[in-house]
Image (tube, grey):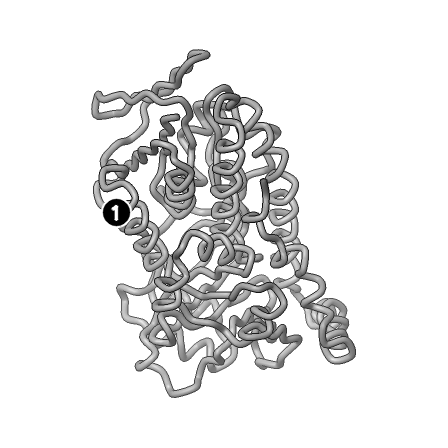
Amino acid sequence: MRILIIGAGIGGLTAALTLLNKGFEVIIYERSLQLEEVGAGIQIGSNGTKVLYALGLGAALEKVAFKPQAAEMRLGDSGRVIFSLPLGDSVEKRYHSPYLNIHRADLHRILVDAVREKSATAIHLGYEVKALQQTPERVTVHFMNGESAQGDLLVGADGVRSVIRKELFDIEDGQFTGMAAWRMTIPTHRLPKNLVPAKATVWVGAGKHVVTYYLRGGELVNLVGVVEQADWPYDGWTCRGNKQDILASYEGWHPTIRRIMEAGDETEYYQWALRELAPLSHWSKGRVTLLGDACHAMLPFMAQGAVMAIEDAWVLAVKLAAHPQHIAQALQQYEDTRKPRTSKVQATARRNGQLYHQTTPAKQWLFYSPLWMASRLTPNFFASQLDWLFAEDVTRIT
């Protein structure tokens, strides 16, 4: 079977690697002229590292990742800890796989190298999709450069602004959620020693929050700051920001947060619009299917966007390998397996955004006091609440 993948992001590359391991012929078409992944840090929960380790990437990941010792929530102004969830050795013991913080570019490079080791000619750059055509026997994709390609199956892994989704279902970009995010990565040597806890920390406040954690073995500090705003006045979905604006957005916040923000230079401040896609009734049509943000773009408040794409990739490969002569059956099983889980993660991420942004001290007390009490009276409470997420192991699916 010849499988065409549109998009060489984390989801598309993971799908390619998994499918190559199953013996399929795979070709990736990426619109960019260079393979470079923008962005900053991402968190890969145990459910995601199970897949990446099963693909043989564990050693490469551990060379560039950071293992946080805990996940915690703090008040953005005072820094008071609301709750803390042990990670590190505890999460590995509970879920049999680590929780990692990694720079998106590092994970992207590891996946590119792994795909090229399997198939040196699998990745094709500078191919922007113009149109699709299908017959009962094959799918044809036409590119803006005048070339075309044919395959037995096409996978749209082209993100929240998916052209393939538009071709299949006439659904445009994900909707702006009324929130925008700052992102920056700061070399640790610019900051006072031990300023940032060796934890994945969410700092919460009225209409905004911040997430901080280390990358590259502690060489970098990653900061993401999410702010509610009425609209997104820019043409693209990312733009360069500046130090004055981010500091003004977090006036009165904890000195740790402001010190990190002050440590950047003017080339290190970016903002992007947070977009979300309502759950789709179908991901597939004929010999074409979707994967990752193309079919379930979600808010980042569960740190699971990339991980859901990684899980998608594994399940898709397993179902195609089980039914290589019956693509429709394989795609239906792929959807039936994945849609309930990704919809649940989407909904939970949305609720977390509301939890993080309580607007008054009274509401903060109402929502955060029970969390504070639960963390002290029942130490395993938060871990048990996340078992449905992190205990999942799609590598066991047949």
Which residue is painted at 60% across and 37% down in the image? 279
Provide residue 239's location: percent of width, then percent of height: 34, 52
Side of 372 where 254 appears, left or right: left
How packed mark 1 is, by other alpha carbons closer than 10 Å (few <14, some 14-19, many 20 or more), is some
* Relative to 393, 22 lies left or right: left
Visible in this render: residue 351? yes
Q: Is residue 397 above or below residue 64?
A: above
**What residue sits 35% from the left and 67% below the top?**
64
Q: Quadrant of residue 166?
A: top left
Closest to the observer, 32 or 328: 328
Can see residue 244? no
Image point 39% across, 19% down: which residue? 139
- Tell me where residue 243 appears, x and y as whole percent: 35, 68
Q: Position of residue 136 (x, y in %)?
A: 46, 12
Q: Which residue in the protein does label 1 denote?
A: 35
Looking at the rendered image, the quarter that the N terminus falls into is: top left
Residue under the point 60% across and 47% down: 346
User: In terms of depth relative to the viewer, which is nearer, 195 or 258?
Assistant: 195
Q: Is residue 26 above or below residue 372?
A: above
Secondary structure state at the residue bearing disc 1 = loop
Image quadrant assignment for residue 355: bottom right
Amino acid type shown at disc 1:
Leu
